[in-house]
Image (cartoon, helix red, strand yellow):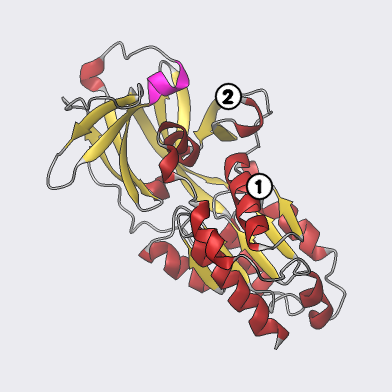
Amino acid sequence: MGIIDSDILLETGTNELEILEFIISGNSFGINVAKITELMQSQEVQEMPLSHPCVEGVFQPRNEVYTIVDLAKYLGHGPSEYPEKDIFIITNFNRMSIAFHVHAVESIFRISWQDIEKPDSIIYGGQEGVVTGIAKVNGRIISILDFEKITFDISPETGIDLNEVQLYTGIDRENTPIVVAEDSALLRNMLMEALHTSGYTNITILNNGEEAWDYISQFKNETPSTILSKINCLITDIEMPKMDGHRLTKLVKTDPSMMDIPIIIFSSLIDENMQAKGLEVGADAQLSKPEIGNLVGLVDVMVNRHLE
């Protein structure tokens, strides 16, 4: 066990990611290595009164206190047969550090987003299910979990704060066409509500980078100014099946007819390393998902800049 080496970087914009496979009750699940800071052997935790049933408690391995989420209980599985071998996956995303309790860790593998399928809606909870993608590796099916949704289900205050958007109401934005690429149904709904509240109602929302690229490409033979009039701004997540946000951004920004489209990467993964990757592929701005108020303000800036 130890710290995940974040210096082993994938080339930006190649549509690849690294997945850590872990086991719960004999089932294989996956998490993007970019979310992980450390793996630790499970240990005794301090229970917290009145906490969510899936929260085991907290522990402090060094100077930081981590909340422990029991993933087996959240997913409806039983406890580990060999608890002494259980693992805590320490994560950092959306500016939060949370430990997820799993039964075993297998290995890290590299895969293309193109090879990750969107699960059927009947898997793990319908349209807003907790599985965002299905990967097949060496004959095994690995379910990639939506950790943003898991944390939101357990602690709704970790979601998007729509009160911040109220500061941007009262301005006519209804004629501004925006394209959004986001695979999580939960976050799509939150984004739509936030943008609609601020007055942005002319929105085309797509499930992944590939769908967004196909949509944008229909205007490829038109002049750059005409394209800009039809797509004033593109907002994209990073983690998406078929095509991630970095690959989408790179494709748009290296196409002479599309390169002037303002692109905002809006992702739970934004940190110093991801900021560098976003700049490398040409993103105009990058925000972590708690910053919904700043997102609306940035869209205003991007749109106005290209209307001048």
Task: Tell me if residue 208 can be seen.
Answer: yes
At label 2, the amino acid type is Tyr
Which of these two is toward me, 183 or 197? 197
- Residue marked by disc 2: 124
Residue at 38%, 35% (x, y): give it. Answer: 107
Q: Report whether 30 appears left or right of 238.
A: left
Label 1 sits on residue: 242
Q: Is residue 299 above or below residue 133?
A: below
| Residue 237 position within the rendered picture, expressed as x and y whole percent measured from the top left | 57, 55
Q: Which residue is located at x 30 percent, y 27 percent?
A: 51
Q: Is residue 284 left or right of residue 105?
A: right
Q: Secondary structure at mark 1?
A: loop
Distance Cα–Cα, label 2 vs label 1: 20 Å
Q: Earlier in the sequence, mark 2 or mark 1?
A: 2
Q: Is residue 255 above or below residue 243?
A: below
Magenta residues, dominant SS class? helix
Q: Are marks 2 and 1 in contact (CB under 8 Å)?
A: no
